[in-house]
Image (cartoon, rainbow, N blue to C red):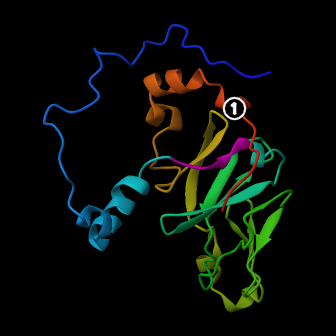
Amino acid sequence: MVHVPTRGDVPVRLGPSVQLVPDYGPSTMPRDVYTDPMRFELERERVLGAHWIIAGRSEQLVGTGDWLTFEGHGETVVVTRQADGSLAAFHNVCQHRGPAIVGELVGCGAKRFTCPYHGWVYDTTGLVVGVPEREDFDPAHLEGLRSPAVAADEWGGWVWINLAGPDAAPPLIEAIGPEISADLGRFRMEDLILHEEVE
């Protein structure tokens, strides 16, 4: 059966009464908007690093310990399904020497992740739970050590992340806003099925 979206009581945002083009008319944008490295870093910091972005589909993380890696904007993040059904996410960077903890793009049933270089072990939330030759390290340094946390949530069948972290990110549904969630919610994206992922 094919889903036919309906608007229901959601207001229409099309037609002659809706302004589609700003009053100041057409313009050109300078090339450096797309090529300037300083501008790119500012965009990474102020936009991509502070707002919710889509990392994958909820159906990729069905069972406890299922995980996916998001790579984009110079960052790599691991997102995992927790036993209580929630999501946890963390930067894919070992706190010992900095290599990626997880090399694969997706997987299922993980209980922990082990850095391939020196064997540091992380739980599915990014907390360090195992260190070879632990006696060589100051216990105060290792206590509570974790890969930096990333905010993670779900809406509309999508997995969303916010690089600002769980303490700084606004709630996802607030960031999406009532108008967009009402409009897009009518399409029941949570019922969509991932057919193919193109790299």
Q: Residue 19: give x, y in percent of width and height.
A: 26, 24
List the single residue furthest toward the bottom: 136
Residue at the spot 56% in from the left edge and 56% down from the top edge: 150
In the rendered image of this protein, does residue 61 appear above or below residue 32? above
Residues in magenta? 53-58
Q: Nearer the viewer, residue 174 or 167?
A: 174
Quadrant in the picture for residue 184? top right
Confirm whether the magenta stretch covers residue 41.
no
Q: What residue appears at the point 84 percent right and 47 percent down from the top-left corner?
A: 63
Q: Is residue 151 left or right of residue 125?
A: left
Crowding near pointer 1: few (<14 within 10 Å), some, many (20+)?
A: some
Q: Position of residue 133 (x, y in %)?
A: 76, 89
Disc 1, SS: helix
Q: Does residue 67 sit above or below 132 in this rendering?
A: above
Residue visible at 19% across and 52% down? 28
- Which residue appears farthest toward the top when viewing the image? 9
Give the residue at x 75% y 23%.
Answer: 2
Viewer-closest of 37 and 164? 37
- Magenta-drawn stretch, dominant element (helix, strand or loop): strand
103 to 163, vertically: above or below: below
Q: What is the residue that sits farthest to the right in this orientation?
A: 109
Q: Quadrant of the C terminus?
A: bottom right
Task: Give left or right: position of 56 versus 36.
Answer: right
Pointer 1 residue: 190
Kind of residue at disc 1: Glu
Residue 51 rendering spot, x and y as whole percentages: 44, 48
**Quadrant housing residue 125:** bottom right
